């Protein structure tokens, strides 16, 4: 099969799948670099004379500033390596928010507000998931931008909803359901369907009692 034939047969759902997988890779890479930036800052600023981690140092303002700056510099360096040098602070803020889930100021505020409580477990258990959700929302939503009204039928079929709707889905409903289906390992809970599309989702008929 020629490249031309392959291109002709690529559907809007194929494009979505490619974009979704690309977004997944970016999200997982984000988690890795976010962890690396934190660990490097800890080694540089929080080790005592015996090489032990001393989180109390993060209660000092000067340490907070250096800690946040090192983390920020690490993230900026990584993004500029992939996307080119930022034009200005605004460009940097936009790129950080899109691909890292925070701006420079938001990162500094996190370090300041947590202080010595910004331990390894807290950072990876609370802060990283918060940043990651922001990145996921941006990237995963963008993976459905190309889908139009003419794709609603194919989406409905892919989600196995053809015989389960009282009315056709709107484009936005179809996009939201497709994304949730993909994020949820290609499964849509009935409760979620009712929350998103209400009475469009047909209720199962109760079995009739035999007389």
Image (spheres, rainbow, N blue to C red):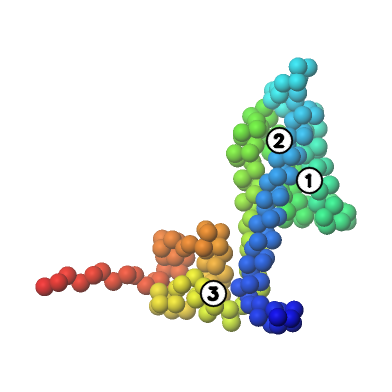
Q: Residue farthest to the left?
A: 211
Q: Earlier in the sequence, mark 3 or mark 1?
A: 1
Q: Is residue 133 left or right of residue 166?
A: right
**Which label sits on residue 41?**
none
Can the viewer see residue 143 in this picture? no
Q: Is residue 201 left or right of residue 94?
A: left
Residue at mark 3 to residue at mark 2: CA–CA distance = 43 Å
The image quadrant that residue 38 belongs to is top right
Task: Give the labeled residue for mark 1.
Answer: 75
Neighbour class for label 3 at 10 Å: few (<14), some, many (≥20)? many
Q: Residue 73: horizontal and vertical position, in percent?
A: 82, 42
Q: Earlier in the sequence, mark 1 or mark 2?
A: 1
Say which element carries label 2: helix
Can the viewer see residue 118 in this picture? yes
Q: Residue 34: horizontal and vertical position, in percent?
A: 71, 43
Task: Give the labeled residue for mark 2.
Answer: 111
Task: Give the labeled residue for mark 3.
Answer: 155
| Mark whose residue sits in front, 1 or 2 | 1
The image quadrant that residue 142 belongs to is bottom right
User: Which residue is located at x 83 percent, y 57 percent?
Assistant: 83
| Mark whose residue sits in front, 3 or 1 | 3
User: Which residue is located at x 87 percent, y 56 percent?
Assistant: 84
């Amino acid at each position: 099969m020629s490249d031309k034939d392959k291109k002709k047969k690529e559907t809007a759902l194929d494009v979505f799948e490619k974009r979704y997988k690309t977004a997944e890779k970016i999200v997982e890479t984000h988690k890795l670099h976010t962890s690396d930036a934190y660990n490097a800052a800890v080694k540089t600023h929080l080790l005592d004379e015996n090489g032990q981690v001393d989180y109390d140092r993060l209660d000092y303002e000067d340490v907070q500033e250096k800690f946040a700056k090192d983390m920020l510099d690490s993230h900026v360096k990584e993004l500029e390596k992939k996307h080119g040098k930022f034009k200005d602070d605004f460009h940097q803020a936009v790129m950080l928010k899109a691909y890292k889930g925070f701006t420079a100021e938001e990162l500094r505020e996190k370090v300041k507000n947590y202080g010595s409580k910004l331990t390894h477990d807290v950072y990876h258990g609370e802060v990283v998931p918060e940043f990651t959700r922001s990145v996921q929302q941006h990237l995963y939503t963008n993976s459905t931008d190309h889908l139009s009204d003419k794709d609603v039928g194919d989406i409905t079929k892919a989600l196995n909803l053809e015989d389960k709707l009282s009315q056709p889905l709107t484009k936005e409903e179809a996009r939201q359901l497709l994304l949730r289906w993909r994020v949820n390992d290609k499964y849509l809970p009935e409760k979620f369907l009712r929350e998103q599309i209400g009475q469009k989702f047909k209720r199962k008929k109760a079995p009739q009692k035999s007389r």
